[in-house]
Image: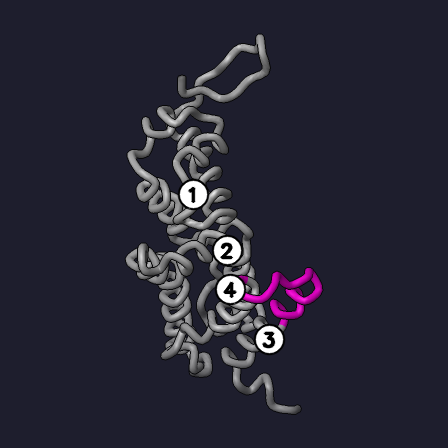
Amino acid sequence: MDSVSAPAGAPRRRLSPAVRMQQILDAALVEFCERGYVDTRMDDIARRAGLSKGGLYAHFDSKDAVFEALLRRSLAPPSLEGMPEPDPSVPPREFAAWLVDRLYAQFTNPAGLRVLWLMIAERERVGHLLELWDCQVIGPYEAVLQRALAAREAAGARPSVLSRAPWLALSPLIHATMRELVIRAPGAAEMAQWRQAHEDLLVELLDPASRLPG
């Protein structure tokens, strides 16, 4: 029976398919990260999710299907609500702080990093999903930044190198993410320094005159 584990004598309740799917994918994330793709079995995922093997197969017909569903779950486009109005009256610092806040919320959450690591580790198997990640997760930030800067410059703001190379705005975070995945996770103080340096860099790129003395 496809139901959650319960203490002896306690009533058993059935989860909705949507909730059960998330439970399975959460369990799969732990198993794939601990064991690697090759050594993870459907039995391992089922046991972690509190299901029978048959219960797991009622939702997914293979380990490949579980793995792809897990990775696709992380490919939702980011929320870009709260964008400052793109005109010269918006201070570069406000714009930079908005962008940095959303970037770090998107890319430094532990589950997101673990999924990114899985995609990198299994890139030969799921290279198409890495391309999708670039289009659906990275692309929206570049596009909204480029549109906002174009509007600011049309209204009289100083031109910025970010207008023609918006990927530069993401580069410090990509560097930080790779360091965290490959070397070690930064402490809170170190992460705060990285974020502040990232914001300061964006301010200088948005307003080159801000770095000149006087």
Closer to the chain start, of discs 1 and 2, is 1
- The percent coordinates of residue 208 (x first, y second) are 52, 85
Question: In this rendering, would 47 be left or right of 65?
Answer: right
Q: How far apart are marks 4 and 1 (CA)?
A: 38 Å
Return the residue found at the far front. 39
- Among the 4 quarters of the image, the one containing residue 132: bottom left
Locate the N terminus by quadrant: top left
Question: 40 or 174, which is in the foreground?
Answer: 40
Q: What element carries label 2?
A: helix
Locate the C terminus by quadrant: bottom right
Question: Which residue has dot 4 on it?
Answer: 99
- The percent coordinates of residue 46 (x first, y second) are 43, 31
- The percent coordinates of residue 54 (x first, y second) are 35, 24
Residue type indicated by callout 4: Leu
Vertical order, 104 against 152 (above or below): above
Closer to the chain start, of discs 4 and 1, is 1
Give neighbour class at mark 1: few <14, some 14-19, many 20+ (Cα, 10 Å). Answer: some
Picture disc at residue 113: 2
Question: 81 or 193, which is in the foreground?
Answer: 193
Question: Which residue has dot 1 on it?
Answer: 40
Question: Which residue has dot 3 on it?
Answer: 200
Residue type indicated by callout 2: Leu
> Which is in the foreground here, disc 4 or disc 2?
2
Give neighbour class at mark 4: few <14, some 14-19, many 20+ (Cα, 10 Å). Answer: many
Do residues under tags 4 and 2 come within 8 Å of each other at their CB atoms?
no
Q: Distance between the residues labelled 1 and 2?
A: 19 Å
